[in-house]
Amino acid sequence: MNVLMLLLSFLALLTGVFVFKKLWLGAMAAVIIYLIFKISMHASFDTITVPLSSGFLISFELTLLLFGAFLFYNILSSNNHFNDFNNITSAFSSKLSIVIILCLFMGSFMEGIAGFGIPTMLIAPLMLVVGFKPLTSIVLPLAANTIAVTFGALGTPLKIGLGINTSDETVLLTLLLNSLPALTLPFIMAFLYGKTEQLKIDWRKEWKILLGAGFCYLIPYLSTGYFSIEYPSVVAGVFGLISFVFFFIPKKENPSLTFWWNTFYPYLLFVFLLVIAKYYLGDYAWKIKEPLKPISFYQPGVVFILTGILYLFLIKKRQLVLALFHQSKTTVFKIAKPILTIVFLVCFTQLIQQDVSGIAHRYYSDLSKTVQVFITPVMGVSGSFITGSASMSNLLLSNGVRSSNTNLPLLLALLNTGSAIGNAISLQNIVMVKSIINYPIRIEKVLQYNLVVIGFYLALTIAVSFIFL
């Protein structure tokens, strides 16, 4: 009965996305169908109210994040902050260099520091400012933010999702499984760039830059992950960017340090405040009532708002209040509809979590070793697609994977990798980044392109995993 309930709910969700082109409608229908089944099965009151209440609390945090990120971007954009960045980068001989710098390296750095969907929400508007099409600005940051999510924000997918706190065998296998995808990801990004921008890629000219970008990312990713689970994404982003710019950007095109500072100091300020907030507030939360999800005092959305206020203070001391009021009002009107979608989507994921976890635990151990290798990363992708988080996907499905008696480190590494990959097609992530871009891009169009990334990534990962099986 639970399997039928989940299938019908997912069918309603996908019908809303692909048939009616309205995610909010599909998510609402999925919630209603699930509730009808639960009530007809005489489920206890708590099994319905607790997930729904937690869903509303999570939606509040995501709304705060969306408002803060959109407000931050609106403040920068309305004050012509990106003019110099647009002028300088438009002179680059290869637009792919900009894609790699923003999506791969800067995205990885921000993922390693912040996570929580923040990288794509920051990178996508920059892509739009530089002159990329709205579809490109959504698809490429999501596609590039896959490998970095294997370690996420300071190792959260491993620490929270799998209970791993040091570089053990699972971490080593995660690094090895993602090595080949790390080398090939720049080529996949170039392929997607050609498709979304409707351009022909000169592979003979670009292959050295693309391969170089892969090595610039892979070497610090591997070497850091061997010793630490907190910083692989951060180090790969920072040192990968430095080495890529030094070796692969022509000297005549390489901007000065002043240019980089003037462009990205608001982002550095945001990261600085985020680290401070994480350090001092990360361990504190408001526990409303058991067993509801506590509301953390560490809220990246608030940090976005504070950063925007500080930026306005630096450039518009006398008009700060008026400018802040105007941008806040604009932001509220633009995010109203996405918030409705997020509420339905998050409530649905909260409702089904226990059933999904139970089904995975019940059937997983009966599968053969070969089938487990194939199915585990797909489970991870599905988990992120549902929950919008690699950490939550790992947490949701790891008990089922642990029911296997053999190859456990490899299977956990496959689950973590699949959960990272799934971020590229997470409905929650797509809604958030679409809201920042604020263009009428259909969700199914984003899925269509990023499913190519998912398929290729899964094929490479599964093929490599048989070496260790």
Image (tube, rainbow, N blue to C red):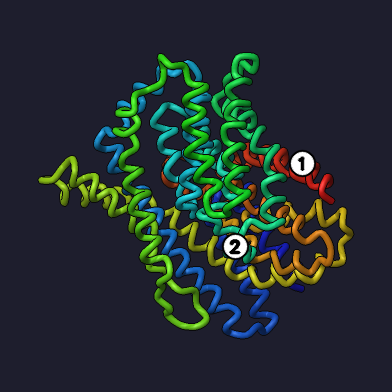
Q: Residue furthest front?
A: 227
Total marks placed: 2
What residue is shown at x 21% (from left), y 52% (from top)?
325
What residue is shown at x 76% (from left), y 41% (from top)?
459
Residue type indicated by callout 1: Ala
Residue type indicated by callout 2: Asn
Residue 107, horizontal then vertical, whole percent: 49, 41
Left or right of residue 182: residue 23: left
Q: Is residue 434 visible?
A: no
- Inter-mark Cα distance, 2 to 1: 28 Å
* Labels 2, 1: front one: 2
Crowdedness of circle 2 by 10 Å Cα count: few (<14), some, many (20+)? some
What residue is shown at x 63% (from left), y 40% (from top)?
450
What residue is shown at x 50% (from left), y 48% (from top)?
111
Q: Residue furthest right?
A: 368
Residue of label 1: 459
Crowdedness of circle 1 by 10 Å Cα count: few (<14), some, many (20+)? some
Residue 387, horizontal then vertical, whole percent: 59, 60
Query: For residue 165, which numbered disc appears in the image?
Result: 2
Residue 166, horizontal then vertical, whole percent: 61, 60
Local secondary structure at mark 2: loop
Q: Residue furthest left?
A: 318
Q: Quadrant of residue 33?
A: bottom right
Foreground residue among 224 and 270: 224
2 or 1: tag closer to the N-terminus: 2
